[in-house]
Amino acid sequence: MAEKERLTNKQRREQARQERKRKELEVAQKRKRNQVRNGLVTFGIVGVVAAVLLQALLGGTATIDDTIEITAADASDARSDAGCEVLTFRQPLPARYHFEANQAPNPATIYPDIRPTHSGPHSVGMHPITAAATSQISEVASTHNLEHGSIIVWWDPESVPRSTANDIGSWAETLNASGFRRDVGGVGIMTAPYEDPGMSSGKSIALRAWGTAMDCDTWDETVANAFVLDNYGMHGIGPERNLAPFPDGVLAYSDLDVSDTPAEEAPSGTPSDDEMVELDDDELEQLG
């Protein structure tokens, strides 16, 4: 065997220098690969966070892309299956006066029959549109929302499971995001629990529009969609329903044409001065 050629000191130094350069290049390439990978991961995380934040800012809910169509027969069957009862239909209470929030009477004295109410006296201010309230909202304020054409679905927290309450809230959020919510007019779809004094019908679900009340044993989305179709905004009889035009392409009957309610069937307009009342001490005491 030939004796291995011996390297000079200069050659060994050059060889060591080349080996260092090779290792430095490997380290640099590995660092670059890690940076690219980490950048992609960071970009993905930022993208997800941005999407979540954007969804939250936009209401955190999807919209309805294709019109939800139901038939009159489907709605009738759903009402029967859900144990629904129409308590009053397009018959608002005769009094419609407004009062300041700090003068709000005891609701039991101004809403003597059906609770939650479907119409009647209410506060000057409206309740902010709340699609999925988790505690009972003001009845005297939200009645003003009904006057403008809103729909309210109340549910009994003693008999409605939390999962169903979530479904009710999600339904309202989707409709609002699809065109039913109009904050300027205080108009939209609202849902909330109703504990005090409890539903007068003894049922679990209460659907309300101005002058119309229907209570059901169980929640059914077809029932709710039909109620909105028949009573929301310009389809209902709210005195100020002109603030709530019915949005196109969201809900429709496939076999019925539901149009705006004509003025001769339900007069509309803003309250006159004589409907804006300020209660004196004796009246406040009488109203509880």
Image (tube, rainbow, N blue to C red):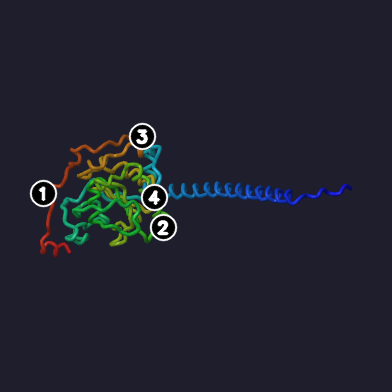
Kindly report which numbered mark, 3 or 4, lies closer to the viewer in this rendering: 4
SS category of the residue bearing label 3: loop
Q: Amino acid at mark 2?
A: Arg
Q: Position of residue 41 (x, y in %)?
A: 53, 49
The correct choice, above or below, for 245 with respect to 207 in the image is above
Query: Do the residues under discs 2 and 3 have CB atoms within 8 angstroms?
Result: no
Rounded to the nearest angstrom, the CA distance separating label 4 from label 2 is 22 Å
Rounded to the nearest angstrom, the CA distance separating label 1 from label 4 is 41 Å
- Say whether disc 4 or disc 2 marks the residue closer to the N-terminus: 4
Q: Amino acid at mark 1?
A: Asp
Q: How many residues crowd mark 4 within 10 Å: few (<14), some (14–19), many (20+)?
A: few
Q: How many residues crowd mark 2 within 10 Å: few (<14), some (14–19), many (20+)?
A: few
Rounded to the nearest angstrom, the CA distance separating label 3 from label 4 is 37 Å
Residue carrying label 1: 273
Residue under the image location 37 percent in, 49 percent down: 57
Residue carrying label 4: 56
Residue carrying label 3: 255
Rounded to the nearest angstrom, the CA distance separating label 2 from label 1 is 44 Å
- Say whether disc 1 or disc 4 marks the residue closer to the N-terminus: 4
Query: Is residue 275 something one can see in this rendering?
Result: yes
Q: Position of residue 184 (x, y in %)?
A: 25, 46
- Say whether disc 3 or disc 1 marks the residue closer to the N-terminus: 3
Q: Position of residue 240 (x, y in %)?
A: 20, 44
Q: Amino acid at mark 3?
A: Asp
Rounded to the nearest angstrom, the CA distance separating label 3 from label 1 is 43 Å
Kindly report which numbered mark, 4 or 2, lies closer to the viewer in this rendering: 4
Rounded to the nearest angstrom, the CA distance separating label 2 from label 3 is 34 Å
SS category of the residue bearing label 4: helix
Residue under the image location 35 percent in, 53 percent down: 132
- Say whether disc 2 or disc 3 marks the residue closer to the N-terminus: 2
Q: How many residues crowd mark 1 within 10 Å: few (<14), some (14–19), many (20+)?
A: few
Kindly report which numbered mark, 3 or 1, lies closer to the viewer in this rendering: 1
